[in-house]
Image (cartoon, grey):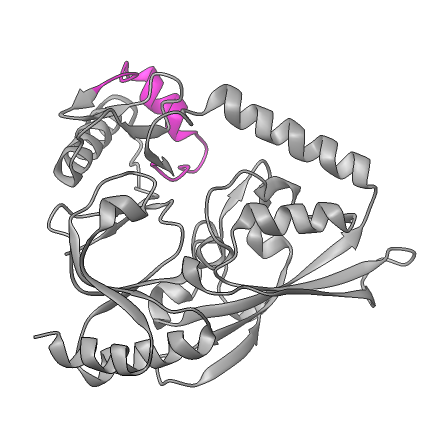
Amino acid sequence: MFEPLCAALDAAGIACTRNELLADHCTFRIGGPADIFIKPCDEIQLCRAVAFCKEQGARYYLLGNGSNILFEDAGFRGAVLDLTAMKTGIGMKENIPGEESGVVYCNVTVGAGMKLSTLCNFALNHSCTGLEFAYGIPGTVGGAIYMNAGAYGGEMKDVLTSVEYLAADGNIVEVPAAELDLSYRHSIFEENGGCILSATFRLKKGDAASIKARMDELMQKRIDKQPLDKPSAGSTFKRPAGAFAAALIDQCGLRGYRHGGAAVSEKHCGFVVNLGGATCADVLALCDEVRSIVKEKTGYDLEKEIRVVRA
């Protein structure tokens, strides 16, 4: 079924493999094989690979660092495009006009496949403040924008000014952040099928020592509070209005609660972790049990923050 697609990719010099285990490409370490695993090296190859998939009627999924997703045990019937192999340039323009007088603004433009931590370090090295909250979030720039990632009082929408993306019709479009419907763990890309190519952020010039101190402080909080030593997909549930998911789960006595190889973290109840050999079915069953118990005991409905990629 996928031979014509593979042939087109090979002819275009776009790297691809068959039956690649998706557990090797996500932080949960869960997931079966993808029929085709494509590794475009730049935007041109990415656009061509997407076009080939559409021409052949193949489903496709755009994969960044795989830090907020759960693949099914059956894998993925179609093509997974790995964006982490793409060359990602970064550029900066200084002295950009801004809202506050006396403040020096900078625009930083970066490829979507770049790791968020790399962008944060670039900002630090150029004494730019605004991205400290994102330091330690384990994902790519594109993935962080896709879900409007945030932590410690900051979100991507706070510093994002525009995005360039490959639209569903094959055109490359640049739009301002105000048109991306950025809200709590949501963006328009969940609905429009666009593939983020690059993004521009508006940052302020600041004091490098203060920026580094804040980054170090937040990283230490992650180390102290989060189960970074075990595979997971980060925060498992969204924050319900007026409460915290982790506190509700703990209140219900579910710290360490497990199903198969999946468990509520002993260290942080907001995380479901892979204790070793966990399956997608284990994680989903555990999440359903936790949601049911929390609903019964507290009245709160918990909504999953992790994205389940169906086979």
Query: Residue 205, percent across and down?
Result: 81, 52
Left or right: 23 as drawn, with respect to 124: left
Residue 110 vs residue 2, the one in the foreground? 2
Does 249 appear in magenta?
yes
**Residue 167 seen in the current view:** no
* Residue situated furthest right in the rendering: 102
From what the image shows, is residue 111 above or below residue 11? Answer: above
x 46%, y 42%: residue: 138
Answer with the quarter of the image where residue 305 lies.
top left
Query: If the image is split into quadrants, where does the N terminus sit?
Result: bottom left
Q: Is residue 311 left or right of residue 25?
A: left
- Identify which residue is drawn at 73% across, 35% down: 212
Where is residue 110 drawn, in percent x and y?
59, 63
Q: Position of residue 15 (x, y in %)?
A: 31, 69
Residue 272 visible here:
yes
Locate the C terminus by quadrant.
bottom left
In the displayed orientation, state which residue is furthest to the left: 1
Q: Position of residue 77 (x, y in %)?
A: 13, 62
Left or right: 155 as drawn, with respect to 71: right
In the displayed orientation, state which residue is furthest to the top: 253
Q: Classify 26 as above or below 15.
A: above
In percent of the image, x 61 and y 40: which residue is there? 133
Q: Magenta segment, principal secondary structure?
A: loop
Confirm whether the magenta stretch covers residue 155.
no
- Count of numbered marks: 0
Magenta residues, start to end: 236-257
User: What residue is at 18 percent from the left and 30 percent from the top?
Assistant: 286
Please tell me in which quadrant of the rendered image residue 105 appears: bottom right
Q: Quadrant of residue 117?
A: top right
